[in-house]
Image (cartoon, rainbow, N blue to C red):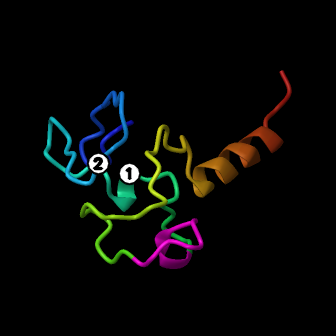
Amino acid sequence: MKCYKCQFEIVMDRKVFRQDTCPRCDSYLRCCLNCRFYDKVAYHECRESQADLVRDKEIANFCDYFEPLVEKKEMDAAAMARKKLEALFKKPE
């Protein structure tokens, strides 16, 4: 997993516990911003519908649905749309 704050690659050989922190920047690892369900546009910014509201997404929490984010999406929606448009209007060689 990668730290949401400093992007440091962290190898976890066990479950991520509430008080675990990044060895480089000391940010909490078990927080919404490091969870695979975190989504800025979803209700409560979480795609897990049964999860409780967590107001501060950077603070460690007790969420039972936490799953470490293994890989972030490489492109946001705008970049993806731009790439599709470029492919659509690309001149044949």
Disc 1 or disc 2, which is closer to the eye? 2
Q: Does the magenta stretch include residue 29?
A: no
Q: What stretch is highlighted in magenta?
A: 43-53
Q: Residue at x 32, y 48 (%)?
A: 4
Q: Position of residue 33 (x, y in %)?
A: 37, 57
Q: Extreme right residue here? A: 92
Tell me where residue 52 sits by quadrant: bottom left
Q: Residue at x 47, y 38 (%)?
A: 70
Q: Mark 1 points at which residue?
A: 34
Task: Out of 14 and 70, give the one closest to the viewer.
Answer: 14
- Badge 2 element: loop
Q: Mark 2 points at which residue?
A: 17
Q: In which quarter of the image is the C terminus?
A: top right
Q: Which amino acid does label 1 sit on?
A: Asn
Q: Which amino acid does label 2 sit on?
A: Phe
Q: Residue at x 46, y 45 (%)?
A: 69
- Badge 1 element: helix
How packed mark 2 is, by other alpha carbons closer than 10 Å (few <14, some 14-19, many 20 or more), is: few
Tell me where residue 84 sits by quadrant: top right
